Amino acid sequence: MWGAVRGQPDDPCRLQHTDRGRDRDPAAASSEAIPDQASAPSAGTTLTTNEQTSLKAQLVFDASWKAMEDRFGGKYVSPREIVWLNGAPGSGKGTNVPFIMRSRGLSRSVGMSQLLDSPEIKSFVDRGELVPDAMVLDALLDAILSPESNDGHGILIDGFPRTATQVDFVKLLYDKLMERHVRTAADPDADEWRSPRPSFKVVILYVDEAESVRRQMKRAELTSLHNERVRDAGTGDVWSVRATDVNEALCKRRYQVFKSHYNTILRLKSYFPFSLIDAMGSLQDCRAQINRELRYQSSLDLDEKTYASIRHLPLARDLVRVARQRLVFRLDMYCRRHFRLFTDIISLIDTEVMPVLKQCSMAGHAEYRSRHPLLLKSHLAVDILIDILTDRGFNVAHFVEERLVPRRVDMKSGKILSETEDVHSFRITFNKENIRDMAHASSAGGGGADGADGTSSGGLIVGKTFVPEHLRRGGNPEELTGLAYQHPEAYHDELSERALERARAGGEEHAAGRGVTPVTERVPKTKAKLEEGCGDMNERED
């Protein structure tokens, strides 16, 4: 079976608008030095729109990754597992961090507030400016990959991602770690322990606004009580009170900031499957849900031995990604090196293939069978035909049929002597329009969408007899249309009567100013003469 793969995704970008505010979370802030652009779905590709990273994220990530490799000199260690923890304010992220680390065997946890604690980043926050995405990503890569702090067991990241660009960072980081793992596994001299197969888990906790505000205010109250006991006892650590926890308006503001990025966070689902954790109940219920969710996500990972056996096979999206370039290269090569054969195949398509496709245009598929000498002599001719049709938007499958053709009969034995012939068969499929939708779209009423009453936007009744406006005499035009179908004679009498009335009305107005006999007086006389003439003719025939 021969097949043709068509289509290649472009490099789409996405438009991300960023709200500016003084109390904005630094981790959610991103620079606007490189504007994003709107992404468009690419037809015929493996990746959907939500599965495509933005150009801005790709540029920033590549620069930060190169800077990280320059700092660490290739000695960095990839963690075995990364858990991305996120959720609404007051949903219990900090409370559940030790539990998740214990259940997953992670050795470290890092919060975004810790990552953004450097003097350089604080200067941006103090000035009320947006923290550049590059700075956020640099700090994140250092925390995850630094050989000084990373033992390779795994890490939990609390509070990341927050924006669409940061969501793309997570996907790009996974792709880069996977690429490094594959490259290291294929090199017998490389330290494979430095590049284990990456495993990303996503945990997102959800509470509604009222519960979030209540918990934030309660947290401030408990922190104040703890600090009072520490001051009275003279021992212990004083907890810091968040300024946003003591003001209900600020608590609501924090929740609204989370809510504004909620759909962006859910975009992670296009990369890594997960379900939201309902954190409205008790702590035990929340932890039971977290356990179930992490077990479910782990069940989607192949066993290491299984994965090692099949990882050399390319992914479908990787094949599709370069298919268009390869197709263009082949077509140009045919035209340069095999111009005569190339033009002969084009003529064959014009004379034999296209008539079949036109005849089957409403079906969306066609089959072309041929024993043309060009196809029988050269496999290259078959490749050229497939590639030309593929470039024109058709999907082509090809196979060779062998059929027995009787040649002669042995008169002594009675056997039929046959020979085999090769027949090239092409199954061609393509997108088609619904023929009825096309009829509605191109109706005489102006091509508008059909209304609920079955008429087009132009007011013309589609599929029914058209009654000219000057012949309509009030009422519903459909009544006259029905009369035409059911009683044709009555229909024509009705049309004659209406024309007569219009003539009478116009004649009376015209005669009033000229002193001539009105049409209302002339018409009966004319009608009587016609009837008399018809009677004389009938008598002569008798």
Image: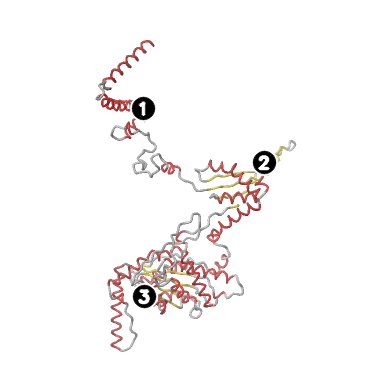
Q: Closer to the observer: label 1 or label 3?
A: 3
Q: Closer to the observer: label 3 or label 2?
A: 3
Query: Label 3 vs label 2: CA separation?
Result: 87 Å
Q: Closer to the observer: label 1 or label 2?
A: 1
User: Percent position (x, y) of residue 427?
Assistant: 57, 47
User: Percent position (x, y) of residue 136?
Assistant: 43, 73
Residue 200 horizontal side relative to residue 526, left or right:
right
Judging by the rendered image, the residue that carries numbered circle 3 is: 127
153 lies above or below 528: below
Query: Label 1 vs label 3: CA separation?
Result: 86 Å
Q: Amino acid at mark 1?
A: Pro
**Going by the picture, which residue comes out furthest to the front?**
514
457 lies above or below 198: above
Q: Amino acid at mark 2?
A: Val
Residue 308 horizontal side relative to residue 230, left or right:
right
Tell me if I can see residue 98 in this picture.
Answer: no
452 lies above or below 57: above
Say which element carries label 1. helix
**Going by the picture, which residue comes out furthest to the bottom?**
234
Say which element carries label 2. strand
Q: Which mark is residue 405?
A: 2
Q: Which mark is residue 488?
A: 1
